[in-house]
Amino acid sequence: MILSLGERVPNAASALGPDFDRARVGALSGAERCLTVFDGRLFASGDRHSGRWLYEHTPGGWLRHQQAGHWLHHVEGGASLRVWSGDPVSGDVLQGSAYDGRSWTASDVPAQAPPPTTPHPDAPLSYRERRAYPGMSVCEVTDTASGEVIGRWRAPTVGGPAWEDETLWLRYEAWPRQELVGWSTRSRQVTERLPLPEGALSNLIVLPGRAAAVWADPYTPSSVVTAGSVPELAAELNRRSAGPAALPYTARTDVAGEACAIVHTPQDGPIGRIMMLHGGPHSSVWPVYSPFVAFLCRLGWEVVAVNPRSSSLGSRFSPNACRYGVDDALDVVNLAESAGDDLPLVLAGWSYGAYLAGRAVSEGARCAGLVSLSGFLSPKTLEASSHPAVKAFREALPLPEPRHERLARVPLLAIHGRADERIPLPQVLADAGDHPALTPVELAGEGHGIVTDEGAALAYASLADWLTTVGGEGRVTRPHDRAGALP
């Protein structure tokens, strides 16, 4: 059974169009720690109301627990229910709360990372995994009574494991799908492989007689799916006939050389193409619903969300297969050239993806414009960051400079949060200040990324305006003309 959060309460982003009024399950930490069970009751974090609230599924629908906080970082269930609120700007955990089934109280229990091991609930067995390299894990099952490792193998795992009786369930990446893979404690080997449709499953939970997870595909906003067991959950997803319905695009997956992508094509055909590059670089994009992508398709733009070879797809890419800023930039160039038409092309990227877009221009990609979303174009920009993750990134991955003379020929839209601690806005503006066609958009209430409805309203309406200068007027009235001035 699919349990959607339904329609969102009208919010600051509603002016952008109906796609921002579809609620999604998720927390500030992502989709892996947003669903749990406590006292036999199902709880999920989501954005039905602006922010990230806690909702309980009841016979009458989803009930909001307002006392739990409105920017939830993650949730934990089991013997007790605890939630941690976070800062939407920095992403830091701020405060914990606990629920006893009747009321909420403040909790001083510190937030912790997911435990490194997952014990079997009834047997002396424990599972753990460690990353061999981005996208590939070393998996181990240990008999905790004897200390013997009874199973060890490598696999492209995604997300956390779950025990169901004598089976350990893992999710393997087989992009654009996942597989639910069952490892048997009896035979000490994989005995079941359950392929899923194109999409992404996360936050798998197993209880006696019940399994639940979070599911999303190109036409389904992140929702809770439940069934009597893990195999029944897989069967439920494979029986579904997801379709474009009221959405403004059709989606397909594609492979071009080393890169793979999800192509979202407007129902009436495109007026231009936006190639969207994710950050990381060790991240990945999956065929899942995005209101931002749907918004761009309503404007008439085809959106191609790309996984270059620097992505964390262990089933496709090996650890030494990429010279960062070179090979993955050439993937973008090759994918752009493979289109075989004359549609105007815009290269857009989040964080590292913006740098990759600039490097693609340096390597010969011809485009009508560049869009940087919380991004950087020069590795020198990162030298101004004191964030430990950015420092580690700089030391691990020395990046080549773009060819600035080529970048100067391309219009640049830079959308950036004023409170970005990873890539400081003043340095971004200083480094791009001499660009002859720079359009900066500063987001007062955002950090690294766009989290709030207010930030989305300003950023995406500004992008819609800017696109009319590089690729035509589009098919629909711009959102702020349709709904009045945006905040």
Image (cartoon, helix red, strand yellow):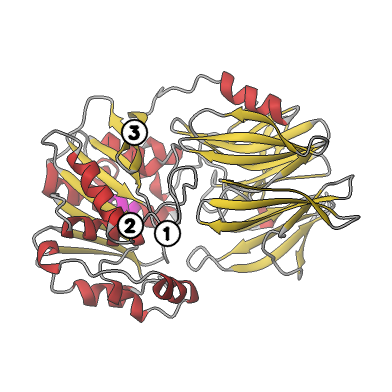
**Which segment did they paint magenta?**
457-461
Q: Amino acid at mark 3?
A: Asp
**Drawn side of residue 249 relative to residue 186, left or right:** left
Q: Quadrant of residue 257?
A: top left
Q: CA distance from mark 2 to mark 3?
A: 19 Å
Q: Are marks 2 and 1 in contact (CB under 8 Å)?
A: yes
Query: What whole-number distance in Å separates the C-alpha atoms at marks 1 and 3?
Result: 21 Å
Tag shown at residue 353: 2
Q: Quadrant of the C terminus?
A: bottom left
Q: Quadrant of the N terminus?
A: top right
- The amino acid at mark 1 is Gly
Judging depth in this view, the residue of 369 and 439 nearest the camera is: 369
Q: Position of residue 343 (x, y in %)?
A: 14, 37
Image quarter of residue 435: bottom left
Label 3, on which residue?
254
Q: Is residue 453 above or below residue 108?
A: above
459 within the magenta span:
yes
SS under mark 2: helix
Circle 3 residues within 10 Å: few <14, some 14–19, many ≥20? some
Please give the label number shown on residue 280.
Answer: 1
Q: Using the numbered discs, state the Cα–Cα distance from disc 2 to disc 1 in whole angstroms.
A: 8 Å
Vertical relation: 421 (above or below) 5: below
